[in-house]
Image: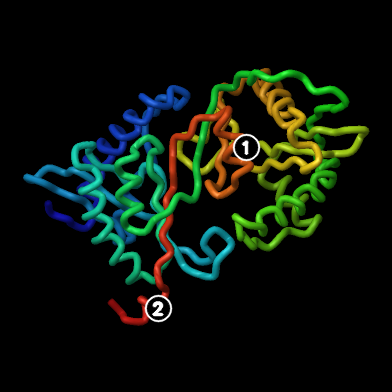
Amino acid sequence: MDILNFERKYVEEATAIAYANYYDERQFVKELPQVCDIPDLNSFAENGLGVVAFENEKMIGFLCCCDPFDNVFRATDVRGVFSPMGANAAVLKNCSKIYAAMYQAAGAKWVKAGAVSHAICLHAHNEELQRQFFLYGFGLRCLDAIRPMELIDCEPCEDYDFVELSKAEFYLVYPLHLALYWHYCESPFFMNRKPETEEEFIVSSIQDGGRYFAAKQNGKLCAFLKISASGETFVATGNTYRHIRGAYCLPEHRGKRVYQNLLNFTISMLKKEGYTRLGVDFESFNPTARGFWLKYFTAYTNSVVRRIDERITQLGL
């Protein structure tokens, strides 16, 4: 096997392999849409951080990443890189061996660029590949999941009202937004992201075009869903897709089917508007979210992350 630098001349072959991997995943996740194209890979040839694998003069895989960025996951002080969905792929035969060789070469480049957090988005149903990255010290971090815009099976719950909030009512969500922040700080999350002020929260919600659907009891907000136009992957876009970007239910209202009914209310509203797919992404170490979303959505990506010893950059390797 030969590992070479990723260059523009390899884009066409790499794109074909990425397509093949995506359609392999579609065999497991029927909700995934047919796609005509994946994100342009030419930009990954410009940063010099990608690699390709060849065997007998035939491309068998590639691994690229975005430019290094600071404050990884908005909860650390380190620099990292991320290989998004479509920016890495390999033929299925011996894929773990191929990725092992590619990461060894690409990882050296990433460290030289000062990146000590390495994140790679993998298709959820390639368990062999995930085991390989586990052997290399990676752990699961994030999942993307999808479902058709159809109601889930649940009994209605009494004493709750379900509404979509107007922009003038966004401030009502802020106390729950803060509760979600403190929830993230607790074990097993340990995610200390700086919370927005109420004014910042309202402004950012309006600027990113977010929509809030909420559950109320006796006129008081007790749960919300934030819906956005797109998610984190190239399939999480389009005129028929919407994405759950924020969600929280006060603990005293859990276990009462409130959130299932809020989800159904949201789905019914979006379906009337012509949307056919709903997606969500969440951290794997969020036990409440993982337990809920995977009941009703099908995961199609597993993003794995490795945090290496940042002192290695001092060696100038």
Helix, strand or loop at label 1? It is: strand
Query: Does 131 sit left or right of 276 as displayed?
Result: left
- Say which mark, if any, is on residue 311: 2
Q: Position of residue 256 (x, y in %)?
A: 77, 30
Query: Does 105 sit left or right of 287 as displayed?
Result: left
Question: Which one is in front, 9 or 67?
Answer: 67
Q: Position of residue 68 (x, y in %)?
A: 42, 63
- Say which mark, if any, is on residue 205: none
Residue displayed at 33% across by 60% down: 47
User: Coloured how?
Assistant: rainbow
Q: Position of residue 182 (x, y in %)?
A: 72, 56
Please tell me how crowded label 2 is: few (under 14), some (14-19), or many (20+) other residues with Cα within 10 Å. Answer: few
Q: Are marks 1 and 2 in contact (CB under 8 Å)?
A: no
Q: Position of residue 258 (x, y in %)?
A: 76, 30
Helix, strand or loop at label 2? It is: helix
Residue displayed at 63% across by 57% down: 187
* Closer mark to the observer between disc 1 and disc 2: 2
Q: Amino acid at mark 1?
A: Ile
Question: Which one is in front, 295 or 303?
Answer: 295
| Residue 155, picture quadrant | top right
Q: Amino acid at mark 2?
A: Arg
Q: Residue furthest left?
A: 56
On-image quarter of the C terminus: bottom left
Residue displayed at 82% across by 36% down: 166
Residue matched to label 1: 244
Task: Answer above or below: position of 187 versus 282.
Answer: below
